[in-house]
Image (cartoon, rainbow, N blue to C red):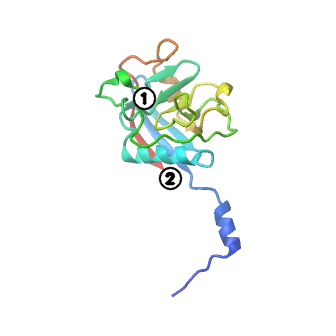
Amino acid sequence: MFERTLTAAGLMALLASPALATDLQIQVSGQANGTITIHLLDNLAPQAVARMVELAKEGAYDGVVFHRVIDGFMAQTGDVEFGKVGGDLSKAGMGGSTLPDLPAEFSDHRFTRGTVGMARAQDPNSANSQFFIMFADGDFLDGKYTVVGEVTSGMDVVDQIKRGQGQSGAVATPQDVMTKVTVVE
């Protein structure tokens, strides 16, 4: 039997190697139709990325609406508790998952067009399942919200997502929907 011993140098090389690249592919239907691919940045936010991957693999994001969309700012989705098509969407945006809230994982990564961040309440440690995709640069968010990824394709689909009304950006029914969210490793 052949045994292989990991040397200190080998261990260091393994630890220094980049993590497996993980993407989310989001099928969107509604006013916007198509696929959005998000490259997840687990080096910046390992806990938030792990949460998104877990929820996507469980199918929790499937059928969730874009409930808050502000033109020139961002599109928000991911309320797996109250944001599912077929349910009472009047509370969409007020829920999360059954998992505990996440600690903030702030970084120096800038919020630019296509950046994906974790949505949260006023408490910086209240992110759970909801996330948002930036339509435009938003430097006022830098260092205040957890960056989890970047759109690598499908920004044209993001741009077509139905906009909400008023300052809150609440989207009237029918909202655009993440029909299927798949993890690609």
For the point 63% across and 56% down, the residue is 18
Q: Position of residue 7 (x, y in %)?
A: 67, 76
For the point 58% across and 25% down, the residue is 135
Q: Nearer the viewer, residue 103 or 44?
A: 103
For the point 41% across and 31% down, the residue is 95
Q: Eyeballing the image, is 90 above or below 29?
A: above
Q: Position of residue 66 (x, y in %)?
A: 44, 27
Residue 115: quarter of image: top right
Q: Which residue is mark 1?
A: 33
Q: Position of residue 1 (x, y in %)?
A: 51, 88
Left or right? Give the position of 137 relative to 164.
Answer: right
Q: Which residue is mark 2?
A: 185
> Upstream in the sequence, badge 2 or badge 1?
1
Element assignment for label 2? loop
| Front tag of 2 and 1 | 2
Q: Position of residue 55 (x, y in %)?
A: 42, 44
Residue 145: quarter of image: top right
